[in-house]
Amino acid sequence: MLYASLAASARLAASGAARGPAVVDPEVRWSWRELDERADEVARSLGRAGVGLGDRVGLLAPPSATAIAALHGIARAGAVAAPLGLGLSAAELVAAAQAMDPRLVICGSGFESAAAAAGRPTLALDGLFVTVGEPRSERRQAAVAAPLARDSAAAGARFAAVAGPPAVAGPRLAPVGPEADPAAPAVVVLTSGTTGRPRAAILSTAALVASVEAWLAVLPPATGWLLVLGLGHIAGLGVAWRAALSGVPLVVLPQSDAAGILAALAGDPAPSHVSLVPAMLVRLLDAAGDGPPPATLRAALVGGGPISPELVTRALDAGWPIVPTYGLTEAGSGVTALPTSEAAGHPGSAGRPLPGVNVRIAEPDEAHAGEIVIRSPAQFTGYLDDPMGTAAARADDGWLRTGDFGRLDPDGRLTVLDRRVDRIVRGGENISPAEVEAALLAHPAIAAAGVVARRDDTLGHVPVAAIVLRAGVADPGDADLARHCRSRLAGFKVPAAFIRLESLPMTPGGKLRRAELRALLDPLADAPFRPRSVARPGGVRIAYLTFGSGPVHLLLLHGTLSTAAQLAGLAHLLAASGALTVHAVDRRGSGSSRLAEPEPIGIETHVDDLAAVLDAEGCRAAALVGVSFGGVVALEFAARMPDLALAVVAWEPPYGPLADAATRRAFAAVARATERAYEAGGPGSAARTFVRGVAGDGAWDRLGDRSRTFLASEGDSAYMDAGLRGLDPSGLRRIHVPTTILTGDASEPFYGPIADALVDHIEGSRRVRLPGMRHTSPITDPDLMADAVGIALAAGGESQA
């Protein structure tokens, strides 16, 4: 029998046919009735603390019987569980709390100071089970008493809770039977994006129940589950839900050492099922001397990261009933599973889709590989307070983009080829290179640092750090560097190796060329871009970087005093969709498209250059994404070459002729001053004059030395672009492709009126304001820009359809 919700499971199991204990850890052994009573105690304690229907409740505690009771109690209170990962630093906890925004945090013993770092009110986990002056039987009666009516106000409170605290909070208990809303949020789970900023994925009761149903349908019948994974991850939460909803014992281990796991598998009750990450399986095989597990073990799920065929073969040879899997938080954990009986013949596969789950490969290449997209009843509701991220994750007709790449064999088995862009997945844990680099740069001996993934047979990938030591400073040694990182980061984020280099591969603007570093430190890694160029009349060569190999071509155009390399992060993310081949073009006078004799040029020259790039690529038409002056070029290209443009997305284009009279005069003055400065003092003088003209007299002086050096090296482009020569505002009316003008609220006062005027001139165009973004955001926050561009292109495709 499968129970309908976590909130109801313990009560129904206690009154039904469930056999054996409900939850067992090294300290306690609770029956279903005892778990039911403790869930009531948690719910009442939360009510007295002001937690209401739909409020998010953080949980910072190692796996234990009391932590499981807290999960049940949070559900019974009608609240939303927001578990926090263990081992996070204070800064990481603050970021996690900001992403999940819990009303309060329940903390286990020894985690009080860590919970306080999250900046939220706290409740001691052990204290939730002490209720003075209220007999337990009365508490149970109160918990069962009249549930809240399912009226519009209650539904509205649930909905509002996704965005913030409800308007009314009090000591209320949620419905635990059929009255409960299965579509309401049940948990929010952190999942890291490519920049390391955590996102909180919302999963409903219906989604989690669907996940449980799919797993139970494909696995051997379970008589008990062993929980060795943390509750801050969907894999650990999934185990807790599977045991509870199927009414079988859950054995909980606070520490996941190999000896403890082996002992628990042979204990009483002996769990029939366990979920592991590959690194755990390696340690178990080592500890067991490659011997078999207890005969009572029926299924050992392995997932959370790349699983090497060698590890699969080793485990099968040792007699372990392993089930390789693939899943992700946004899909409620499981997507595919490979039965043990098939693993020997397909050791590199993650198996077929679970019942009810559909998997396809989007835009496969010649080798039938592409992005894995899925559709499942266990899909997430969305990211908390992140509509752009939610929209970017969703494809057409309910499909979910995973950002992972793989292929399907003729029998429908999935092989996962690679993980998401730049993110490092170490033994099931997500790592952002940027945060590790920040920790390394805080060391007094390190002048520069870059962190990338290196493949590892045991953990899938591990972070490795390339460091440049400060001149005249003694090498502190690997042990000291590891201690330094461990004091600032969770242990799994500490680099596995520290490689000394004389310098890191950098762009002229001081950005790390991560792909080059990855290729240097991991020779097996593929470079994500291909440098190319096309010859133009007069000996000019236009250079560009090509990312991805999707069927739709996209021209990505940078702004003045910028280069294609500065948009590499954005290009990489756009290409990661699998649908695009992105050509990041260095416009003439910029980056690698240097000119022997720079001079101011008209817009028609840039347009002709882009047409030559498409011709060189054998491409009949392309979408265009332009940043700042690149947006002006993109718009003019669509107007002048209408048959070559598929869509246009322009970020804050300074289309001067459409500005008000005062702004037009200011544009003209900057152009004259920049051209005079170039003729008198060269590129550096032109860059300095241009920056002061567009950003204020003190702007240049506020820049760091490295930024000034880079901008000075790109002064040719200021000289060539500043005059905005050859723009044809009347021609904008010839644009007939989907067009989106993007602006950020930080620079809205200047670019907003120009954007409004552009929308007036371009029939059917859209104007989108993006909160929190600045003029430089396409370079500094490429993930946000990639989301916005993806949504704009998708909306354009829908409008054309």
Image (tube, grey):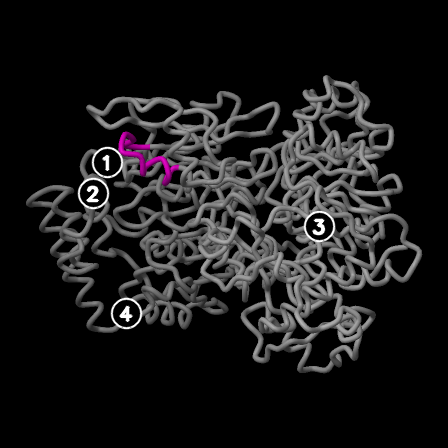
**Mark 1 neighbour density, 10 Å: few (under 14) some (14–19) many (20 or more):** some
At label 3, the amino acid type is Ala
The secondary structure type at the circle numbered 3 is helix
| Residue nearest the observer in this picture, 411 or 739 | 411
**In the picture provided, is 687 more to the left or to the right than 82?**
left
State the residue position of label 2.
716
Mark 2 and 1 residues: CB-CB less than 8 Å, in contact?
yes
* Mark 3 → mark 1, Cα distance in angstroms: 70 Å
**Mark 2 neighbour density, 10 Å: few (under 14) some (14–19) many (20 or more):** many
Return the disc, 4 or 1, that comes first in the chain's sequence. 1
Return the disc, 4 or 3, that comes first in the chain's sequence. 3
* Mark 4 → mark 1, Cα distance in angstroms: 31 Å
Res 382 → quadrant: bottom right
At label 4, the amino acid type is Ala
Q: Is residue 156 magenta?
A: no
The secondary structure type at the circle numbered 1 is loop
| Residue nearest the observer in this picture, 643 or 509 | 509
Up/down of 311 relative to 36, above or below: above
Look at the image and tell me in which quarter the C terminus lies.
bottom right
State the residue position of label 4.
659
The secondary structure type at the circle numbered 2 is helix
**Mark 4 neighbour density, 10 Å: few (under 14) some (14–19) many (20 or more):** many
Mark 4 and 3 residues: CB-CB less than 8 Å, in contact?
no
Q: Give the label on residue 595, or none.
A: 1
**Residue bounds of the magenta highlight:** 437-448
Q: Is residue 441 magenta?
A: yes
